[in-house]
Each structure stands twice: as structure tokens, then as C-alpha cells.
Image (cartoon, rainbow, N blue to C red):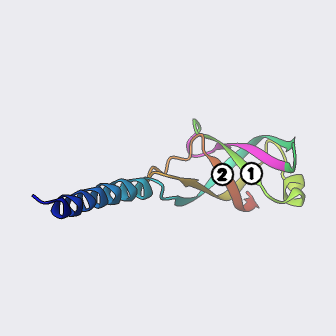
């Protein structure tokens, strides 16, 4: 084999390896968006006062009593209207890198809330 053919073969093999590596990297970094609706009992609410204030609810799913979730509330006014030990119908969203839609121990964001 002459030098030119060796260079061409090397570049081809290197290109294929780079292509395979980058497609696997991008394939694993896809964000999947989930939403769920449920009836919850609010068992706690709190806020963090770091750089920006964030508001959270800790709730227990009424239909699945072993499922507890943390819900971030983006609006302070809504957070102030929510009472501990009351029941609410909520719609929440969260993001994952896998198709697993289990909400347990996920960071969720409140989309909608109605008192039951």
C-alpha cells in the first residue's frame, strides 16, 4: 500500500469512530419531558432563600400513599394560598434523561392546582 492509500484509510476509520462516539453521546443526552396529574395532601411547604427565593410544597399522593413528591411553585402568591393538610388536584411536570416516568424523588414544577 502506498502512503496515500494509508492516509485515506486512516481518515476513513477515524471519521467512522468519531461519528459513532458523537451519535452515542447525543443519543444519551436527550431530555424527556413528563407531566402528571394527581390528588395530593400537602404535608409541608417551605422556601429557600439563597440567591433567589424558591417556593416548595411537599405532598403525598392520595391514590398512592407511599409516593411523596416535592413540587416547586414558581409564584409566591400561589404558594401563599396553599394550606398544609389540605387536599389539592395538581398538574406537575419534570424532566429526565430516560423514558422512566416514575415521579418519586424527582424535582417537579407546578403547572396547575385546584383545591378539592
Residue at 48 percent of width and 59 percent of height? 30
The spot of residue 12 in percent (x, y) is: 24, 62
Q: Earlier in the sequence, mark 1 or mark 2?
A: 1
Query: Which part of the image, by quadrant, shows the N terminus?
Result: bottom left
Q: Residue at x 62, y 45 (%)?
A: 62
For mark 2, give the secondary structure: strand
Q: Which residue is mark 2?
A: 108
The answer to which of 89 and 53 lies nearer the viewer is: 53
Asked if the residue under mark 2 is in contact with the one under mark 1, i.e. CB atoms within 8 Å, the reply is: yes
Q: Quadrant of residue 90?
A: bottom right
Where's residue 51, x and y in %?
Answer: 87, 47
Read off the residue under disc 1. Answer: 72
Q: Is residue 62 above or below residue 14?
A: above
Give the quadrant of residue 88: bottom right
Question: Magenta residues, as a range?
Answer: 54-64
The residues bearing labels 1 and 2 have C-alpha atoms spaced at a distance of 6 Å
What is the count of numbered marks? 2
Asked if residue 23 is among those painted magenta in the image, a careful observer would answer no
Q: Residues within 10 Å of mark 2 (few under 14, many from 20)?
A: many
Q: In terms of secondary structure, what is the magenta stretch mainly?
A: strand
Amino acid at each position: 500500500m502506498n502512503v496515500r492509500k494509508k492516509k485515506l484509510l486512516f481518515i476513513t476509520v477515524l471519521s467512522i469512530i468519531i461519528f459513532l462516539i458523537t451519535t452515542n453521546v447525543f443519543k444519551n443526552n436527550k431530555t424527556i419531558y413528563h407531566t402528571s396529574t394527581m390528588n395530593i395532601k400537602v404535608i409541608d411547604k417551605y422556601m429557600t432563600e439563597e440567591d433567589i427565593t424558591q417556593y416548595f410544597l411537599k405532598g403525598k399522593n392520595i391514590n398512592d400513599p407511599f409516593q411523596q413528591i416535592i413540587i416547586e411553585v414558581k409564584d409566591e402568591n400561589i404558594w401563599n394560598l396553599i394550606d398544609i393538610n389540605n387536599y389539592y388536584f395538581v398538574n406537575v411536570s419534570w424532566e429526565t434523561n430516560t423514558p422512566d416516568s416514575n415521579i418519586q424523588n424527582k424535582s417537579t414544577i407546578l403547572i396547575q392546582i385546584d383545591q378539592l
